[in-house]
Image (spheres, rainbow, N blue to C red):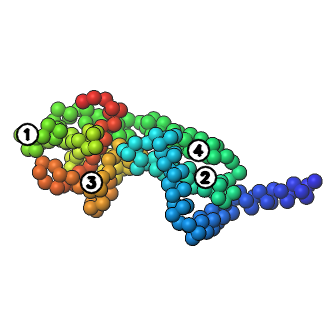
Amino acid sequence: SASDFADALRRRSNRCNGAPFDAFMEELTRQIAKDRDAIVGWLKDRVDSMRHSYLDLPDADYSVGKYFCLAYAAGRFAQEYCGILPVSADEIREAVVDVYRSHRRHIAKSAAEADPVIILRQYIDKNRDAFLDLRDGRRNSPQGEVLGYITEARERKEYSFTSEQFTRAVAPIATSRACVALKVVALLIHDSGSKESTQRNVTKREIEGGRSYVYCISDRIFDERPM
């Protein structure tokens, strides 16, 4: 009947529009109060399963991909613990994977003249012969200006720039925008040294025998192309 239909519509509206966030937070708070270690472990397991099994994210990519993994974990919690997502775990996972892939395709289609990643890639390619390769054990700069450095980090190469070099390399794009763009496609490398820096996305590392702030870019900027 019309009355039954209206009642059903009201129940579903209350369940799926506006109410889910409150229900999610109430249930999350309740579960944490009951057994914090268990629920945190459960969420971490969901994040790890998405990271390793479905998005296949290495450490260099995880700075961006973790947000998609967290979205998946939150979706699974909402579905399994709160009962506010009337969809299956497979549907949640596929939705996150589809959005992640669309996100990467969108970034890849950016115009070259406005894309900091492409500008930096072209800059490195053009000036590669002027880079100092620290993998050879050399610690002193050759004569003239060194445009960047190639270092070894956890068995992967990277391009390291001082702040001034990085600003010049991504010009005319603002440094902050370039950092965001590189982070989105997981090309900006972080390590524990970044916690010491007052600048976002900057790592403190030893370059030419001294500690200085540098921007570290994964060699994946060339899609694993050999030097």
Q: Secondary structure at mark 2?
A: helix
Query: Going by the image, does 8 lie left or right of 41?
Result: right
Mark toward the viewer: 1 or 4: 4
User: Which of disc 4 and disc 1 is earlier in sequence?
Assistant: 4
The image shows residue 13 at horizontal and vertical percentages of 75, 58
Q: Name the kind of residue labelled 2 in the image.
A: Arg
Write down the residue under mark 2.
Answer: 76
- Look at the numbered disc 3 and give the secondary structure of its residue: strand
Q: Determine which residue is flagged by label 4.
A: 93
Name the residue: 17% across, 55% down.
211
What is the quadrant of the C terminus in the image?
top left
Q: Residues within 10 Å of mark 2 (few under 14, many from 20)?
A: many
The residue positioned farthest toward the bottom in the image shown: 33
**Real-space Cα separation, disc 3 to disc 2, in angstroms:** 35 Å
User: Which label's residue is closer to the chain start, 2 or 4?
Assistant: 2
Instruction: Give neighbour class at mark 1: few <14, some 14-19, many 20+ (Cα, 10 Å).
Output: few
Residue 142's tag is 1
Mark closest to the chain's N terminus, 1 or 2: 2
- Residue bearing the label numbered 3: 203
Kind of residue indicated by mark 3 = Thr
Q: Which of the two marks, 1 or 2, is nearer to us in this view?
A: 2
In the drawing, what numbered circle is on residue 16?
A: none
Disc nearer the start of the sequence (3/1): 1
Instruction: Identify the secondary structure beneath mark 4.
Output: helix
Q: CA distance from mark 1 to mark 2?
A: 55 Å
* 107 lies left or right of 167: right
